[in-house]
Amino acid sequence: MKMNSISRTIFFVFLLLSFISRINARQPVQIIRGRIIDKATFAPLEGASVLLKEATPLKGTVTDSSGHFFFRNITAGRYSIEVSYMGYHSRSISGILLNAGKEKVLEIALNKKLNPLDEVTIIADEQAGNDPVEINYLSSRKITVEEAQRYAATFYDPVRVVTAGPGVVATNDQANHLVVRGNSPNSLLWRIEGADVVNPNHLTNAGTVSDKPSLSGGGVAILSTQLMATSKFLSSAFPAGYGNVLGGIFDIQLRDGNNQHYEFTAQTSLLGIDVAAEGPFFKNYRGSFIVNYRYSTLGLFAMAGIPIGDETINFQDLSFKISLPAGKLGVFNLFAIGGTSTTVFSGARDSTEWEFQKDRTDVDFYSDMGAAGLNHNLSLGPNSGLHSAFALSGLASGRTEHSILPDYSTDISERHKLSLIKRSFSSWYFLRLSNSNLIKAGTLINSNSFEIKTEASDSLFETLKVLHNGDADYTSIQPYLHWQYQAAAGLLFNLGIHSLYSGFNRSVSVEPRVSLKWQMNSDGYFTAGYGLHSQMQHPSVYFNSVPENENLGFTKAHHLVAGYTSRLHQHLIFRSEIYFQRLYNVPVLANRRGSFSALNLLETSIISEELANKGTGKNYGVDLSIEQLMHRGFYFLLAGSLYDSRYTGSDGVERNTRYNGNHSVKLTAGKEFEVEKKSEINVYGINISAINAGGFRFTPVINSTTIPEGETIINDENAFSEQLDDFFRMDFRLLWRKNKANYTRTFAIDIQNLTNKKNPAWPYYDFHQNKTVFKNQLGILPFLSYRIEF
């Protein structure tokens, strides 16, 4: 009897272990769910058809009364979704990545057909750049989080993903400053959740010649990709809803957290330690939260006494979004991002190690940024909707430089501080007048506070002298009106008017916008547009030691663009655009002939002369791309640009701008291989990206031992007459993603500048060597990361 009891116990244990092993042997599955809404009015669409491709067998469903759909027990992998609804343009989203550790929650907005008889199929793909909200098909591209996690050497920075497309190049490997079709990075506009914000990047001095902060770009974006939803980047002929911008717009959207289940993500890499959590507030309420915190790994290494490079870099950031549905009152969203960053460079305390001038200095730099806001979406019926947003954002940075004396003591030689606070309110109302007419009316109000101070000494032990000191409070108001008219099947017109008023100098600009889209057949469409645009320059141009410069007006530009987009195959898209931008009212020297132009500025500059709005400029070129959307694990984007960027200063001489590289060719390509087992799915991925771009322009440096130490004297008459060598860089990424039941692990290695090409960055006069030397960009840089989702 005793043996029988033992036998039965062993038998039941065996059955239990067998049962557990069978549970663990199940393929990792997850849920794909979401909501279908009217893009303009935010109203849910009941009865919309949703088809999940690549599922075996093929799966389809329809939305419920609140617009929701569900697909359960879907094996981890990549899928495409097609959504259709009577009276609306169909929409497809390809390359959706479903991991076992996280539900895929989508909000898909459909654009209503203005003409119900119009059955022409619109090329509509998440990566094709179409945007029904802004009714804009010109010079725009979707930026997805998945791309930031797939492309090589983007460091999970959504801003760097933009450079894979045509017409956009970065100024330096160390930073994400964007040059859009020959325009300075200062011509970029940043917007989060519908409100304008200050520069949302860490280390705003990264990649700048003077090592001073910039107001657009930096070392890495403060916003983690954990929080970002699909966003968009626009580069020309902007619709009426955007203003005070000339070069490009990064319009960032934040995603909602999972409102049904708690989920967590942890990631560690050479960039930072990243943790995120999301979930519902309580049961049976569709509200949610998502929060992310990141601390730089480089900072941890520094605290442990492990040096990485010649600078000690440290940063951290925190971001969150809270979604609060309020029934008939609409949806309220609270959001915030904030971060701090520092770099410390300590010169050598051994004179035999002084090779360059920088080796004889200590430099401390800090940059703090924060933004918090509230937005509200309200459906007012089947034909109208209201959106409002408010954000308070601020940026403060400072740089202090000490010279190392022969006895290794130090003396302060330069100090720089800059701050910008922006209070932004925007609101727009959308109304369908008929089947072929709709209007969008809105306004944007920005209240700004700016302060800058630069001090330096002529020589050691002398008192610091104020070189640049300015501050101001000013407000801009931007009302606009947009009208869309469907003239015939496949022919769409957009007419708009935007106005910009600045309170500090009472400048007014009234700006017409017009575009058309002609859907020639189911696989291709033609676009064309024109817009008058204006922008305030970097605040340091207006607010400095020259009071007369506060009377400067806006810099303005005429934008002309035309393009053709064609679907060559189901997943292969060709895009082409030609553009011309004529700039005028550019600040140049007022009282003497010279080559200075505000179009060449990036970082904060010391303006010590009176300026006048008498300069001009022009950018023109062609952008081409062929993109294979993710299909059967393969994708690529081949992009090329030919362009010319020129300006004219007060001396009347037409010159190359600082950013006139003339050409760029880029390739991003990759392949994923899936290996299925009983209890797990492994994905192995490889991505290669390469760029060859014309070098930027620079002004020759005057070599002379009589130049006061600390100054670099340039040959002003030959401004930007020389060009850096072509820039070439190849990046590489290997990825291993392992899906098990309820969690996903991803290991990746990125190598930036695989060939270790020493690309030149800029020349400067080095007083230690008494000659002009070139500062090089980054060499080969390996980057490891590990990520787990559960």
Image: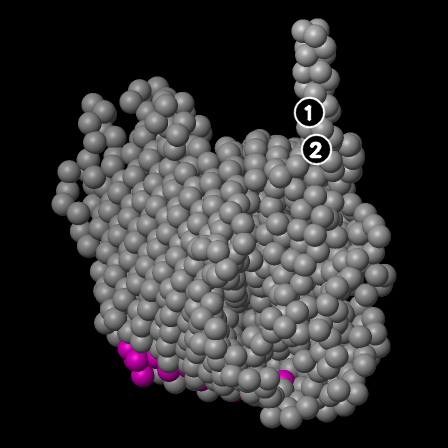
**Image: 118 above or below 648:** below
**Image: 506 above or below 148:** below
The residue furthest front is 1
Q: Is residue 395 visible?
A: yes
Q: Say which of 436 and 611 sits in front.
A: 436
- Residue 86: percent from left, percent from top: 75, 79
Is residue 500 one of those drawn in magenta?
yes
Q: Count the numbered circles shown.
A: 2
Q: Say which of 762 and 567 sits in front.
A: 567
Left/right of residue 549 with respect to residue 478 in the rendered view = left
Mark 1–mark 2 CB contact (< 8 Å): no
**Which residue is found at the position 73% from the left and 88% from the top?**
115
Q: Which residues are magenta?
A: 494-506
Q: Say which of 243 and 13 sits in front.
A: 13
Amino acid at dot 2 = Ile
Q: Which mark is residue 23?
A: 2
**Which residue is found at the position 66% from the left and 44% from the top?**
99
**Which residue is found at the position 54% from the left and 50% from the top?**
261
Q: Nearer the viewer, mark 1 or mark 2?
A: 1
- Residue under label 1, please give it: 16
